[in-house]
Amino acid sequence: MDDRPLRIAAQQPDEWSDATRAELGGVVATGGSTRPVHLPGVIAHHPTLLAPYLVWAKAIALHGVLAPRDNALLALRTAVRMHSSFEWGVHADSAPTRAGLRSDELDAVGVGPSDSSWSPRDRALLQAADELHDEGSIRDLTWLSLDHDHDDAAKLEIVFVVGHYTMLSMVANSSGVPAEAHWRTLPHGS
């Protein structure tokens, strides 16, 4: 858990307008009636952004060309680099089921691409996330490494996924969205 103050609380279902309910009703329904709303509930404070954001988020998280494992590795590494306890927690919580990541792999995400346990494919993804975070671009050598397993659409999506989770980390960190107490703690990686 981190000690950022809560600045913008997520709107709860009983606070939603009809338009917000139409947009977020499915988000809550997919996880059951007790599922926390978190970031979509924060974004609900800006109704004009909510609908387009949800379309974008679904495209990135659910309908992309990247394998769920690739998407999860990129999201998790981005959360580490952005120091986002919320984004780390939500993805680490679902990664074993959704993406098949093991506990030792989650630990290795905190170390980054230098961890010796990574395959060349996974290392290239983590390296790309780090380079996008540090430089705003993927270096030539990493791009060539990505060529082995990813077509142009997938490489574009890598950039979009890292950008998306960078943005969400900024929103979560700045608004003070808390991680759930039962979620895996953000590693102290680079």
Image: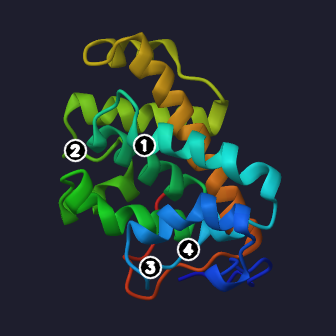
3D distance between C-alphas at marks 3 and 4: 6 Å
Q: Is residue 147 left or right of residue 132?
A: left
Of badges 1 and 4, nearer the viewer stands 4
**Where is residue 111 shown, x and y percent of the image?**
37, 55
Rendered image quadrant of residue 40: bottom right
- The numbered disc on residue 35 is 3
> Would you say 160 lies left or right of 76 here?
right
Q: Which residue is mark 2?
A: 116
What residue do we see at 18% from left, 60% from top?
102
Q: Is residue 83 visible?
A: no
Q: Is residue 118 left or right of residue 14?
A: left
Q: How far separated are the C-alphas under marks 3 and 1?
A: 24 Å
Asked which secondary structure carries label 4, the reply is loop
Whichever of labels 3 and 1 marks the residue nearer the N terminus, that label is 3
Q: Which secondary structure, mark 3?
A: loop
Which of the two discs, 3 and 2, labels the residue nearer the N terminus? 3
Separation (CA) of disc 3 from disc 2: 37 Å
Tell me which amino acid carries mark 2.
Answer: Ser
Are the two marked residues, 1 and 4, in contact with CB atoms closer than 8 angstroms? no
Instruction: Please tell me which of labels 2 and 1 falls first in the chain.
Output: 1
Vertical side of 81 occupied by 141: above or below: above
* Amino acid of disc 1: Leu
Q: Amino acid at mark 4?
A: Val
3 and 4 marks in contact (CB < 8 Å): yes
Residue wearing tag 4 = 37
- How far apart marks 4 and 2 lie (CA) works out to 37 Å
Image height of 61 relative to 189, above or below: above
Q: Amino acid at mark 3?
A: Arg
Q: Check disc 1 and report its element: helix, strand or loop.
A: helix
Q: Report if the CB atoms under discs 3 and 2 are less than 8 Å apart.
A: no
From the top left corner, tell me how far across and down residue 50 is, in percent: 71, 54
Where does label 1 land, which residue? 74
